[in-house]
């Protein structure tokens, strides 16, 4: 099921780029004579029709690129100098550029997701346990704000408050910074606070809502009354019995949310000037760099499909009542 | 006996009157509705009262601070002719925000309606006709697996110039953004509507209608659609909120409307470079976006409660 989906997605992205009237040569100066332009098109690999180039791209993505990775790790020679996916802009392999940019994005996105989930879980649990209390009302309001305030405003607002007015935190994320000492570690921490918090706010809003709803579902179940009736302490009932059962749907929501946070990173990276994948995508888009755009978009699609699969499997593992045939 | 007389005296109540009564008890939803009406009036009627041309350049009056800055800093350059200040080219910010709000709200509403139309059609068709169900739902799942924001960006970039030359700079981009958002946000509605239609199909009134020979077309328009109105309305509010945010995000990434054409996201994007000295220029449009979306979300919350008959009347 996943593989046809991926093939379909690859085809959709490819055809969108193919059918679009935009031309990678449109940015070139008009003084270039037409026959030279035609040669440049051929050099970019645009001479062949789409039914030749699409399987070629698939081959490069799924066979040639992994071969190069294996070669790089084990020193073998599977790839044998086969053509890799080449960026129009930098004329270097697309995956090399992505490998350079990935760590920055993973740091910011990964940290923010972990922070967001860690904040969201206790909020969800307490909100459900003390339903309609002041804490619950505040939690609802804050998550409503998290849903409503777009990252490009919350990010800019944080910069205005903490960088411009209070001058506490740097507004630009310096990716060349290397942690070598305590001071540089503190600097790294300070520059990460804002991007991480902006992304974490969105995660927190979503996950805490799901956690609360799931806890509420379980708190009214019969087994909770039984557990209380046999004299278990309240903390055992809530933290062991209810929490474990409530985590089942929440874990899948957490898995499903990972791709969307990468989407959010596109905007956040633009605000804090992190040179990660999102910024790479924007630059590639503006430069009509079709192989780069195609590869990054497709990688995101792979991430979505893989996370869906993981969520399905996790659900089956965590909840023995559900089995897939 | 008393019960009977009470019932006799009560006026006949329609379903929507009940919904409205329940809706009114949700404080956040009422506030949200109030704010949405206010901001809509501000953007539609506002320019009639505050009739300053949003695009008019006035270099002499550039970089005026908002009027409230005079309270903190007596030396600030303020002027009653530009109560929210003016930008680096002397354009009035209040007029720009009104103009931008018109576009942002128009994009939001149209894209939401388009998404609802597609979503409801797909949902009803796949819920009602068994033959189409597998195919349409498989398609919905495929679209859900697409990375939507990058694809939207790609669409914006690639189709911008041709549409601009066919329909003119503003119309072309408007059509592009509305279609783009519309065709990437209908999937949730389709799923919800499909589920509800499938449940309704098993009910007795549908069986009764079918037994008197109601054709499929009238079955859908008379019996099914009115009964799935409530989930559609709730997803309409969610759709409006996401459409406004997506449009602003596109503008913010520089792939939305052209630069001399204000929308809230565009004003925000243009002001980011100067936010160190003029923070108000990012705060006003940002607040407008956030508060509008917040109020729409609250309306959705209230609607969901009001339309749920299990809660209503308690």
Image: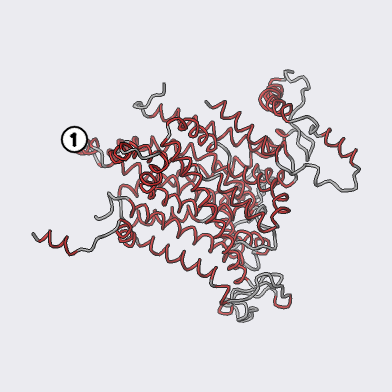
- What element does badge 1 sit on? loop
**Across the whole image, how many numbered discs are drawn on residues?**
1
Residue A82: quarter of image: top right
Residue B94: quarter of image: bottom right
Q: Measuring 51% from the left and 36% from the top, which residue is drawn there?
A: B140
Measured as percent of width and height from the top left, residue A263 is found at 58, 44
Asked if residue B68 shows in the view, the reply is yes
Q: Measuring 64% from the left and 68% from the top, which residue is drawn there?
A: B278
Residue B232 appears left or right of A183: left
Measured as percent of width and height from the top left, residue B2 is found at 10, 61
The one nearer the camera, A119 or B156, is B156
Residue A67 appears left or right of A144: right
Q: Which residue is mark 1?
A: A230
Q: To which chain does the residue with label 1 belong?
A: A
Disc 1 crowd, CA 10 A, few/some/many (<14, 14-19, 20+): few
Measured as percent of width and height from the top left, residue A73 is found at 68, 23
The residue most toward the front is B213
The one nearer the camera, A77 or B1, is B1
Measured as percent of width and height from the top left, residue A318 is found at 39, 29
Asked if residue A242 shows in the view, the reply is no
The one nearer the camera, B111 or A87, is B111
Residue A94: quarter of image: top right
Q: Relative to A186, does residue A57 appear above or below in the rendering?
A: above
Q: Relative to B32, does residue A181 appear above or below in the rendering?
A: above
Q: How is the image coloured?
A: secondary structure
Q: Measuring 41% from the left and 24% from the top, which residue is drawn there?
A: A324
Query: Which quadrant: the C terminus of chain A?
Result: top left
């Amino acid at each position: 099921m996943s593989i046809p989906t991926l093939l379909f997605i690859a085809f959709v992205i490819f055809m969108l780029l193919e059918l679009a009237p935009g031309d990678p040569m449109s940015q070139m100066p008009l003084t270039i004579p037409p026959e030279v332009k035609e040669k440049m098109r051929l050099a970019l690999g645009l001479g062949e029709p789409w039914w030749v180039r699409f399987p070629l791209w698939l081959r490069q993505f799924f066979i040639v690129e992994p071969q190069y990775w294996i070669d790089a790790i084990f020193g073998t020679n599977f790839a044998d100098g086969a053509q890799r996916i080449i960026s129009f802009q930098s004329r270097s392999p697309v995956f090399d550029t992505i490998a350079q940019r990935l760590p920055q994005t993973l740091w910011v996105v990964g940290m923010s997701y972990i922070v967001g989930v860690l904040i969201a879980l206790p909020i969800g649990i307490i909100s459900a346990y003390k339903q309609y209390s002041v804490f619950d009302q505040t939690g609802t309001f804050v998550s409503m704000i998290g849903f409503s305030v777009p990252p490009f405003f919350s990010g800019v607002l944080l910069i205005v408050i903490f960088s411009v007015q209070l001058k506490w935190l740097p507004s630009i994320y310096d990716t060349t910074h290397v942690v070598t000492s305590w001071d540089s570690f503190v600097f790294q921490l300070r520059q990460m606070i804002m991007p991480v918090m902006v992304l974490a706010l969105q995660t927190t809003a979503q996950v805490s809502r799901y956690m609360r709803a799931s806890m509420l579902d379980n708190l009214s179940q019969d087994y909770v009354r039984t557990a209380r009736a046999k004299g278990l302490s309240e903390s055992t009932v809530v933290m062991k019995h209810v929490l474990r059962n409530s985590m089942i749907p929440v874990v899948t929501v957490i898995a499903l949310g990972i791709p969307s946070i990468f989407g959010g990173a596109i905007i956040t990276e633009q605000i804090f000037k992190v040179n990660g994948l999102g910024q790479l995508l924007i630059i590639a888009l503006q430069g009509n760099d079709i192989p780069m755009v195609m590869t990054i978009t497709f990688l995101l699609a792979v991430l979505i499909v893989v996370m869906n699969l993981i969520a399905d499997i996790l659900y089956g593992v965590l909840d023995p009542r559900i089995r897939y045939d | 006996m008393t019960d009977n007389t009470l019932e006799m005296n009560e006026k006949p109540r329609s379903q929507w009157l009940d919904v409205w009564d329940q809706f009114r008890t949700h404080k956040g939803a009422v506030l949200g509705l109030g704010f949405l009406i206010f901001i809509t009036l501000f953007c539609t009627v506002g320019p009639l009262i505050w009739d300053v041309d949003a695009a008019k350049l006035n270099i002499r009056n550039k970089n005026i601070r908002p009027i409230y800055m005079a309270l903190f800093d007596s030396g600030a350059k303020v002027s009653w002719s530009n109560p929210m200040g003016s930008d680096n080219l002397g354009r009035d910010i209040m007029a720009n925000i009104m103009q931008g709000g018109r576009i942002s709200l128009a994009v939001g509403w149209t894209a939401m309606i388009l998404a609802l139309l597609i979503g409801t059609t797909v949902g009803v068709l796949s819920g009602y006709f068994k033959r189409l169900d597998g195919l349409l739902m498989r398609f919905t799942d495929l679209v859900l697996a697409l990375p939507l924001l990058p694809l939207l960006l790609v669409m914006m970039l690639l189709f911008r110039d041709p549409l601009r030359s066919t329909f003119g700079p503003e119309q072309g981009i408007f059509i592009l953004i509305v279609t783009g958002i519309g065709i990437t946000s209908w999937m949730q509605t389709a799923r919800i509507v499909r589920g509800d239609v499938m449940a309704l199909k098993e009910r007795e009134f549908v069986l009764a209608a079918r037994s008197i020979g109601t054709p499929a077309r009238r079955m859908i328009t008379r019996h099914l659609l009115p009964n799935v109105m409530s989930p559609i309305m709730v997803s309409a509010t969610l759709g409006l909120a996401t459409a406004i945010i997506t449009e602003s995000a596109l503008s913010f990434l520089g792939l939305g409307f052209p630069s001399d054409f204000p929308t809230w996201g565009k004003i925000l994007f243009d002001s980011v470079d100067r936010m160190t000295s003029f923070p108000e220029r990012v705060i006003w449009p940002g607040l407008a976006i956030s508060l509008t979306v917040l109020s729409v979300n609250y309306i959705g919350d209230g609607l969901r409660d009001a339309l749920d008959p299990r809660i209503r009347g308690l």
